[in-house]
Image (cartoon, helix red, strand yellow):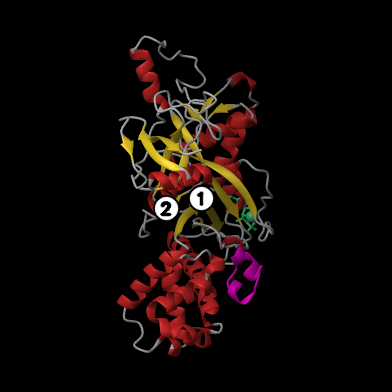
């Protein structure tokens, strides 16, 4: 199961542009609101933080004299692996994630405005949200162009308003689901105490992907805040709304793409939590990815420069456009998209990349493919749980694992680290 990232935000901020740039899927992009109606789902690739283990394989083979050093013109720049999905070039291994581009959200969606609850349902199964913001401040809260340039202050205020309104919509949505039949439902489980309450809430919110663990965490936080001295079945709408707010933080962690950064006022990110927000130029990324796909340029997503494949094959307009983008790319050290996805996947969601193999010596599968799989899994996943990720039979029959580097035998509960190579032995 791929990690699922939902792109949300008000209309016309560049969600579809971001989606299209990251997935290279063809979708509708237009400078008017509600261009996207049905959600687009696609696969994007994120570069693993650590080098692919095929780097170590190569080093060993070279040291043993069994392999020549990398040739200048090697298109794979030395990579030896054979990825089933994604690519590996210069030992930079890419791993897949699912991106969901949804319709623009307008204030009042939780009461059914715009696409209303259908929109919210599109997001329900996302592991994390990226809210795309208009950092240029040129559109109003419903995505209409205002026809004027924003000052720094106006742009920042508009961004804050966008952040607040998404949170508000999510809170109202969750609060509404809790309110529905609350006192009756909670009374039913009151004999079971706190545990009954937690499972009741989890059931109410299971459609949003709520797990017992998430609800547990949220309740700990809610109780610590001392929000209510009443019994849960007496909680009124206001208390439930506050509970909804606390739950929202656990159900829908949000990172921010401050998009249209190319035309945003200087310093627009100042004052925002920049661990959680990255300036983005989705349309520049899209243009570069397309130019790359058309073999006009060499560009690696995330890079702060690109090179021309063949200068003479370009017309003047293309050359001019590429020069312009090159300058922006350099000034902003990349378009921001790859940086944001990297942070969301590895920092927010604390995922790691691990490499299951069938042969712990040569790091190949049964068909001799070198390091075919790079799995994105939660940090410290246990060896047996990884076996289940590979195949349920492998999990059921798990006997032991073998660390591909140390060759040490590891048990079912062995916790995996980023970049681990693991052989799994199972009863067949
Ligand atoms: N200047 C600038 N314009 C951008 C950027 N990204 C997107 N745009 C433009 O913003 C407009 C809206 O883009 P879309 O991707 O259709 O926006 P959306 O958020 O999907 O809109 P809806 O589907 O209507 O909600 C288009 O004209 C894009 O070309 C960017 O980084 N910089
Ligand atoms: Mg769209």
Vertically, is 348 above or below 109?
Answer: above
Question: Is disc 2 surrounded by few (<14), some (14 to 19) or many (20+) residues within 10 Å?
Answer: some
Image x and y of residue 424, in percent = 43, 37
- Residue 349 — which label? 2
How far apart in space, not on screen, are marks 1 and 2 (Cα)?
9 Å
| Magenta-highlighted residues | 105-121
Q: Who is closer to the viewer here, 260 or 56? A: 56
* Quarter occupied by residue 198: bottom left
Q: Identify the secondary structure beneath mark 1.
A: loop
Is 39 on the left or on the right of 250, as rendered? right
Q: Who is closer to the viewer here, 12 or 178? A: 178
| Cβ atoms at labels 1 and 2 below 8 Å apart | yes
Q: Would residue 428 be counted in the magenta stretch? A: no
Q: Earlier in the sequence, mark 1 or mark 2?
A: 1
Is 137 on the left or on the right of 145, as rendered? left
Image x and y of residue 68, in percent = 42, 10
Question: Where is ligand 2, by quadrant?
Answer: bottom right
Q: Identify the secondary structure beneath mark 2.
A: loop
Is 122 on the left or on the right of 387, as rendered? right
């Amino acid at each position: 199961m791929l990690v699922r990232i939902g792109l949300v935000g008000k209309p016309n901020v560049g969600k579809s542009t971001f989606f299209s740039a990251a997935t290279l899927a063809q979708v509708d992009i237009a400078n008017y609101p509600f261009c996207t109606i049905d959600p687009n789902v696609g696969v994007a690739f994120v570069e693993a933080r650590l080098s692919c283990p095929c780097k170590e394989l190569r080093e060993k083979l070279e040291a043993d004299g069994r392999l020549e050093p990398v040739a200048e013109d090697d298109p794979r720049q030395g990579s030896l692996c054979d990825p089933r999905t994604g690519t590996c070039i210069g030992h930079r291994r890419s791993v897949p994630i699912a991106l969901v581009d949804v319709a623009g959200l307008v204030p009042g969606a939780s009461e059914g405005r715009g696409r209303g609850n259908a929109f919210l349902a599109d997001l329900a199964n996302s592991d994390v949200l990226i809210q795309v913001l208009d950092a240029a401040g040129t559109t109003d809260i419903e995505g209409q162009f205002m026809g004027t340039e924003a000052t720094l202050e106006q742009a920042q205020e508009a961004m804050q308003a966008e952040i607040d309104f998404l949170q508000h919509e999510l809170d109202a949505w969750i609060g509404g689901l809790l309110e529905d039949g609350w006192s009756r439902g909670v009374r039913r489980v009151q004999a079971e105490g706190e545990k009954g309450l937690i499972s009741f809430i989890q059931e109410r919110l299971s459609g949003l992907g709520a797990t017992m663990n998430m609800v547990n965490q949220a309740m700990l936080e809610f109780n610590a805040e001392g929000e209510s001295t009443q019994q849960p079945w007496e909680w009124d709408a206001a208390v439930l709304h506050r509970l909804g707010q606390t739950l929202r933080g656990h159900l829908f962690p949000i990172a921010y793409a401050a998009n249209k950064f190319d035309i945003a006022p200087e310093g627009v990110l100042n004052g925002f939590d920049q661990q959680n927000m990255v300036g983005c130029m989705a349309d520049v990324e899209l243009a570069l990815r397309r130019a790359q796909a058309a073999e006009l340029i060499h560009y690696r997503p995330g890079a702060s420069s690109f090179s021309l494949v063949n200068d003479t094959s370009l017309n003047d307009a293309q050359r001019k456009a590429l020069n312009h983008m090159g300058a922006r790319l350099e000034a902003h050290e990349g378009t921001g998209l790859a940086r944001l996805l990297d942070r969301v996947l590895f920092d927010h969601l604390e995922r790691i990349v691990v490499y299951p193999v069938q042969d712990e010596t040569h790091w190949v599968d049964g068909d001799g493919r070198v390091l075919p799989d790079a799995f994105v899994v939660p940090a410290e996943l246990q060896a047996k749980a990884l076996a289940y990720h590979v195949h349920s039979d492998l999990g059921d029959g798990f006997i032991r694992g073998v660390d591909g580097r140390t060759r040490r035998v590891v048990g079912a509960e062995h916790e995996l680290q980023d970049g681990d190579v693991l052989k799994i032995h199972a009863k067949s």
